[in-house]
Amino acid sequence: MVPPDDFNPPIGAAEQIAPGLRRIVAPNPSPMTYRGTNTYLLGTTEIAVIDPGPSDQTHLAAILAAVTPAQKITHILVSHTHLDHSPLAAPLSAATGAPVLAFGTATAGRSAIMRDLVRQGLTSGGEGIDTGFVPHITLADGERLRSADWTLEVLHTPGHLGNHICLAWEDACFTADHVMGWASSLVSPPDGDLTDFMAACRRLQARRWGVFYPGHGAPIDSPHTRLDWLIAHRLKRESAILETLSKGPGTAADLTSCIYLDIPKGLLPAATRNVLAHLIDLHGKSMVQTTAGIEIDAVFGLREHC
């Protein structure tokens, strides 16, 4: 999906994007983060900072400068522990005294199959993990957080990362990296699990939403249309993988070179991890098989080819 050219907010400025909600974009643009990480400030007196962002002193100063004398940061909420979302939580907590809340450490919520693959030697790839992250308060799926200004419901949405959460705010949802408007989410085993990702998409699809506030890019004003696209996109990718495997077995890299024909070379490793995520999902559904264990260089084939 081509990113919309009209999303180009001022970096480091606290912009009001809805009543009681401001957004500050961190100065970390990249092919994986688009314009930068969206840090949200929710509330008018008691402020929840959602996804403080990367380790960057300029961004820390921007967050602190956005808080008026009549306001206080009371919650620091981390959607997941990728390096563009969580590292600033600890310095922000030290500066404000507010606790850090998240689903858990870097490996929390990891699926059983991914834990097994880690034991077999599959290593992380793709986006960097904040391995030292430890929240002050561990959140549970379905938990509600309240202040004088807002109420948030925690939705555990693993897939992009095992500890990923979305936060429901009335008919709005802070979807972090699970649903974005500018690109599909990266699912990179063993940190990400496509089976979990698709289940979480369908969980979100079952509720009524007015708007999504993603971790990168502009607000999504048609949440269900976007979810429909995201699910269809993954199913289309699955079909392309199965079609390619019908011509013979191959590694995730082999399949990526056949399927991803129009992306920059620098994104091919991430694309290969996405393909591996699909292959693991298909393996779990007994649609593909390997002659050895699942790993980044494993040769996969349809069951009749193995």
Image (cartoon, rainbow, N blue to C red):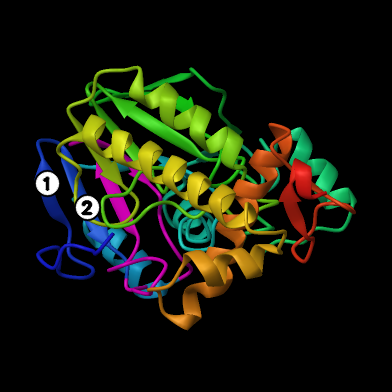
Q: Is any atom of residue 74 visible in this view? A: no
Of 101 and 130, nearer the camera is 130
Kind of residue at disc 1 = Ile
Of 166 and 137, nearer the camera is 166
- Residue 139 appears in which quarter of the rendering? top right
- Residue 174 appears in which quarter of the rendering? top left
Choose the circle earlier in sequence order: 2 or 1.
1
Above or below for 261 versus 275: below
Q: What is the magenta segment's predominant secondary structure?
A: loop
Task: Rate crowding at label 2 as few (under 14), some (14 to 19) or many (20 or more) other CA atoms within 10 Å.
Answer: many
Query: Is label 1 in a helix, a strand or a loop?
Result: strand
User: Which residue in the protein does label 1 denote?
Assistant: 17
For residue 46: magenta? yes
Kind of residue at disc 2 = Arg
Above or below for 3 versus 120: below
For residue 158: magenta? no
Identify the mark at residue 68; answer none if there is no mark.
Answer: none
> Marks 1 and 2: in contact by CB < 8 Å?
yes
Task: Indicate the position of residue 80 as horizontal and vertical percent values.
Answer: 52, 46
Task: Indicate the position of residue 280 as horizontal and vertical percent values.
Answer: 69, 45
Q: Is any atom of residue 56 visible in this view? A: yes
- Residue 7 appears in which quarter of the rendering? bottom left
Please give left or right for residue 67 compared with residue 48 in the image.
Answer: left
Task: Indicate the position of residue 189 as horizontal and vertical percent values.
Answer: 67, 52
CA gap between label 2 and label 1 equals: 7 Å
Query: Is label 2 in a helix, a strand or a loop?
Result: strand
Task: Indicate the position of residue 130 as horizontal and vertical percent values.
Answer: 62, 59
Q: Which residues are magenta?
A: 27-55
